[in-house]
Image (cartoon, rainbow, N blue to C red):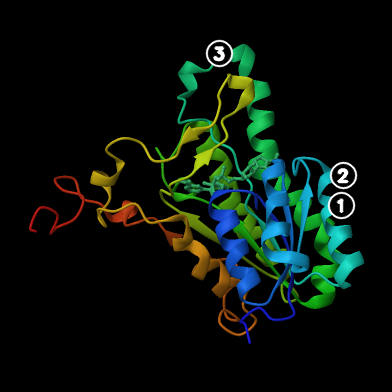
Amino acid sequence: MGVLDGQVVVFTGAGAGIGRSVVTRYLAEGACVVAVDISESVTELRAEFGETVIPVVADVATWEGNVAAAKVAFDTWGRIDLFVGNAGITDNARPLEEISGAHLANAFHELFGVNVLAPMLGVRACLDALIESKGGVILTGSFASTNAAGGGALYTASKHAIHGLVRQLAYELAPDVRVNGVAPGVAPTRLRGTESLGQEMADSVLEGTVNMLPTQEIAPVSAYDGLFTMLASRTDSVAMTGTMVTADSGLSIRGIARPGGRVGHR
Ligand SMILES: NC(=O)c1ccc[n+]([C@@H]2O[C@H](COP(=O)([O-])OP(=O)(O)OC[C@H]3O[C@@H](n4cnc5c(N)ncnc54)[C@H](O)[C@@H]3O)[C@@H](O)[C@H]2O)c1
């Protein structure tokens, strides 16, 4: 018996990083998953886990991509219990003054298309089925959902928007659909950059980051599996909606003189 036995999940950004790790956990917990990613790497999940996962290669910034994913889930399993909007791209912490005015609109539309519009499209595409199943939504926010300097102006604004979206959708969809978010701090992944800024993939963990963290360690990508599982559970988080669960290795409580009071004591 798994915690998610019988649940049908549509999950974006499933091809790598945090998403791939959470999908692996969801499958182990008994869920059936439509795993969506713009990267072909997502198709590897089928070979690894068999027929309880259906990879869909699609751009989640498009309505068509989200409809295709929702349709596959509904046509195959006849229901959708959970939509997870996790796909994201970064601006590599590029300050506003280092983006030319002429490039700003394109960069905004590209980054907000993936980080903000896509989860709205995904929820909308799955909505009738989610209301029918009395299901849930989980969106991936960030330390940057409530703090400055977790990215550049574009990324930070987009992740603050996710915080607002979680709260607004939790209100709009109550009492039928619970909506929550997970806000990681630093995970060892390689996020895609914003192409219209000429950016490629880059390491999310920068040199010296580990020393900034009160926990003094970079948690593995699997560190978020349990939180996403708890929020998906129909028993373990029934009283939660409109909540961002922070998992930032203590970043938001770090000190001025030292990241943590006992850092350097051992
Ligand atoms: N890594 C970190 O330090 C960190 C910290 C806070 C929040 N996050 C958030 O976690 C989420 C997952 O990121 P990650 O760190 O695992 O990075 P990742 O790059 O490993 O995973 C993101 C996935 O989204 C996919 N994707 C990007 N654009 C897409 C599109 N248009 N359509 C479909 N799929 C698309 C990518 O191909 C990738 O597989 C993101 O929302 C990110 O902003 C990451």
**Distance in Å between CA atoms under marks 2 and 3:** 31 Å
Residue position marked by numbered label 1 in the rendering: 67
Amino acid carrying mark 3 in the image: Ser
Depth check, mark 2 against mark 3: the one in front is 2
Q: Which mark is residue 196?
A: none
Picture coordinates of residue 12 (x, y %)? 69, 52
Determine whether label 2 and label 1 are within 8 Å by CB: yes
Q: Secondary structure at mark 2?
A: helix
Q: Earlier in the sequence, mark 3 or mark 1?
A: 1
Residue position marked by numbered label 2 in the rendering: 64
Residue position marked by numbered label 3 in the rendering: 100
Q: Residue at x 56, y 26 (%)?
A: 200
Picture coordinates of residue 93 (x, y %)? 45, 31
Tell me: 94 left or right of 163: left
Q: Measured along the vertical axis of the image, is residue 234 above or below residue 105?
A: below
Viewer-proximal residue, 163 or 224?
A: 224
Q: Residue at x 50, y 70 (%)?
A: 226
- Image-quarter location of ligand 1: top right
